[in-house]
Image (cartoon, grey):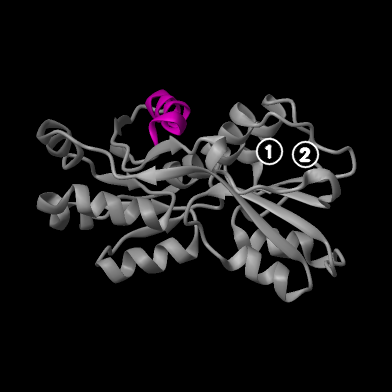
Amino acid sequence: MKVLVTRPVEQAESLCERIGQVGHEAIKFPVIKICPIPPTAWAKIDVTDLDLLIFVSRNAVIHFVAAWQGVLPKGVQLIAVGGGTAAEMQAAGLSVDAQALIENSEGLLALLSIVDMENKRICIVRGAGGREALAAGLRARGARVEYVEVYQRQLPKVLPAQQMLAAQANCVIVTSVAALDNMLLLLARQKQKIQQQALIVISERIARHAVQYGFKQVIVASGASDDAIMQALLGMKIEE
């Protein structure tokens, strides 16, 4: 198979290597460009009495650690959205006090459902314009939630040769709703052909979005990790 990998450049390499190792061809086609937000533009927060610091993506960890100049208080608990984010935290020298089993906002809310949130101070580290579901769920339980947005997503520029190569794929991997939107925008001329290919996504929410776009064969991986995506890829059957 020719597998279109739409992850940002920074997160695509290991997955592409694993696709090649099992005999398939990975086509790199990043549909989101990750750009750091300078710390001078971050929201000002007092970390001294934070209860929870939540990282919702690998990029949140990378760009927070790269620019953070302060010292985190010993009492703050560091929470990861999932395995990939937890691994990035550990690689950066941060502890991981807990991680969600389901790698999304709903998974984090389930993880924290047994914790008393009344008057807890929580900071969510994320990209600009992320989902509001996590903050809304925590605020509904009495928490005081703030954001630090450390990166922004941009639509990358692609060459006609990249578009032609992408159109040769017979399997597509997409890991966010924004990535799906961007892919179809970047491949507007190839849209009908891409919609006919098998699509691997990492959540039911993305799957529903894909079906609305007209995708017929949508496979939901068990998570966002390379392992989960590879398991979905190796277990799928391409429809003729």
User: Residue 98 placed where, x, y %?
Assistant: 78, 47
Q: Residue 25, located in which quarter of the rendered image?
A: top left
Q: Amino acid at mark 1?
A: Ala
Q: Amino acid at mark 2?
A: Val
Query: Which residue is outermost to the right?
Result: 75
Magenta segment, prevailing SS (helix, strand or loop): helix
User: Residue 26 placed where, x, y %?
Assistant: 32, 31
On residue 86, the disc is 1
- Which quarter of the image is occupied by the C terminus? bottom left
Q: CA distance from mark 1 to mark 2?
A: 6 Å
Horizontal arrangement in the rendering, residue 207 relative to residue 171 (left or right): right
- Which quarter of the image is occupied by the N terminus? top left
Which residue is label 2 attached to? 96
Camera sees residue 120: yes
Horizontal arrangement in the rendering, residue 128 relative to residue 3 (left or right): right
Q: Which residues are magenta?
A: 8-21
Is 15 a magenta residue? yes
Which residue lies at the image location 39% right of the left edge and 31% below the top edge?
A: 9
Residue in the foreground of this view, choosing between 201 and 148: 148
Which residue lies at the image location 57% right of the left edge and 44% below the top edge?
A: 42
